[in-house]
Image (spheres, rainbow, N blue to C red):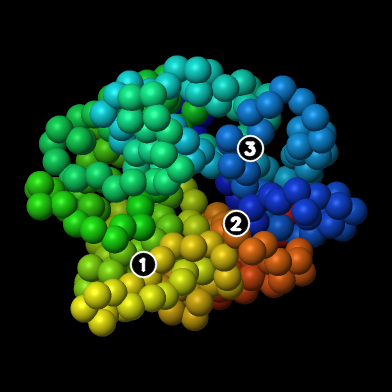
Amino acid sequence: MYRPSALPKAAGLGLKPVHYADIIGGKPDLGFFEIHAENYMGDGGPPHRYLEAISEHYPISLHGVGLSIGAEGPIDKAHLARLKMLIERYRPASFSEHLAWSTHESAFLNDLLPLPYTPETLDRIVSHIDEVQHVLGQQMLLENPSTYVLFAESTIGEIDFLEKVAERTGCGLLLDVNNVMVSSVNHRVDPFDYIDRFPMGLVGEIHLAGYDEAVDSAGDRLLIDAHASPVLDDVFALYDHTLSRCGPVATLIEWDNNVPDFATLFAEAQRASAMMASHAPGQSLSKVA
């Protein structure tokens, strides 16, 4: 049995170098911090010194962006070994990755690309997740993607696909509510229906973020998962609906581009905390010391 995801039912923030001093000096009332694994794969230096200091006071969520779980080729064993070193060093409360691919042969693509939902894809992803969890000794949470195209080859719905992966591997799910909004608007489906059908018992973490908006060639709304602005009201409304189904779950505010000052980010986390409190009267959302 792999070590399960165990984040507190509280709001967290992505750890950004520009905020190291605010966090260490102020010890803000947050449940956890999340890091992108690839930013901490060096052996030492200031990033590790700060992370070690912060991890003494907060649980850490380790979020991978480069494992390429959906790639046709094998998992990069050198990359997986670096992940294992990080997990052994920091013992994160959670590890997660994306339902996506970003490598082809020897090339690495700086994007998280979508997949057709077919039995063949399902078998490949199950095999990759089995390998990752066996090597890391830790459960993985698999994140639902933001998508802009649909594949004619797909024969399995996205939610059914995620649920089948979890059933066959024992992995959990990371529910990105902003991704649900982005994909649902882009594909003209109801995001609340998506949430109503999602297997909430498998969710170990929730993500919230801001999106950008454009207009496609047909004049329809096109949402882009940008992580460069506050969480919009429609995403918070969808999050509130999500909480009505599952109760409080560890929730990350993602803001990776045009990163604001710490006070602005902290206010976003407080809004998520208030929503969680409204679905669990009396529950403490203070940080884990």
Residue type at tag 1: Val
Residue type at tag 2: Asp
Residue at (47, 36) in percent of width and height: 66
- Residue 169 lies, in percent from the top left, at 31, 31
Determine whether 21 is above or below 110 in the image. Answer: below
Can you tell which quarter of the image residue 258 is in? bottom right
Does residue 34 appear in the picture of this structure? yes
Residue at (26, 29) in percent of width and height: 72
Q: Earlier in the sequence, mark 2 or mark 3?
A: 3
The CA span between labels 1 and 2 is 17 Å
Residue identifier under label 3: 39
Residue at (13, 36) in percent of width and height: 119
Residue at (37, 70) in percent of width and height: 223
The CA span between labels 1 and 3 is 26 Å
Residue identifier under label 2: 256
Determine whether 273 is above or below 60 in the image. Answer: below
SS at mark 2 in the image: loop
